[in-house]
Image (cartoon, helix red, strand yellow):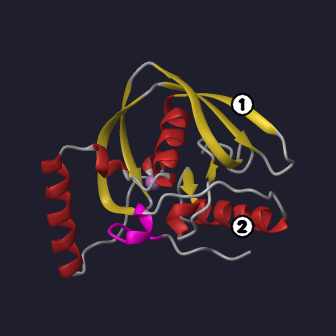
Amino acid sequence: MALLRIRKYPDPALKQPAQPVENIDGEVSAFLDSMAQTMYAAPGVGLAATQVGDARRLVVVDTDHQHPGQHLLKLINPRIVESEGSILWEEGCLSVIDFTAEVRRASKVLVRAWTLDQNEIQIEAADLQAVAFQHELDHLDGKLFIDRLSRIKRELYRRKLAKMLKEGKADGQLPSHVRI
Ligand code: NI
């Protein structure tokens, strides 16, 4: 297993919509292990394959930061089949350095996905876990949380980032719980 390189905005790979996985094999399993390792090392609570430059519909999510590894989900071709409620959550992203913003999402979602043992499962998620699923599925569609902000907020971030990069001040430090 190796740590994978997390692509950072504005890397064009982040805009690439991912394609469904058609064979669940040892390579997919090994890749999901590397994704999980990369997510924990970052550290973050979710990672989509899109973020490491891979165009397959694969995500790892572990929002239980009290017990890392115990509630890790490795999901293949995940999709949201039901959503309800509304929640405003301060989001950050491993691919968006030095920035967080409140995003409105559904507060509960029902996710259907395939697992490595070739079963289709259903997961009911609420709060941070629901936010994480919606955020990761956005990644698979080539969308970042900053794409859900107003144009002016996104533009202000773009300018701040350009300035930070120019001055060498972008350190990527964010509280781990918001790095989705
Ligand atoms: Ni993200």
Q: Is residue 58 above or below residue 78?
A: below
To which residue does mark 1 refer? Answer: 122
Name the residue at 78% across, 38% down: 120
Q: Quadrant of the N terminus?
A: bottom right
Q: Earlier in the sequence, mark 1 or mark 2?
A: 2
- In this picture, residue 20 sits left or right of residue 7: right
Mark 1 neighbour density, 10 Å: few (under 14) some (14–19) many (20 or more): some
Name the residue at 43% across, 56% down: 142
Q: Amino acid at mark 1?
A: Gln
Pinpoint residue 149: horizontal percent, then vertical percent.
25, 44
To which residue does mark 2 refer? Answer: 31
Nearest to the observer: residue 114 or residue 9: 114
Q: Quadrant of residue 38?
A: bottom right
Residue 12 within the magenta-colored segment of the rendering? yes
- What SS does tag 2 mark? helix
- In this picture, residue 166 sits left or right of residue 7: left
Ligand 1, image quadrant it occupies: bottom left
Nearest to the observer: residue 8 or residue 65: 8
Nearest to the observer: residue 159 or residue 147: 147
Rounded to the nearest angstrom, the CA distance separating label 1 from label 2 is 22 Å
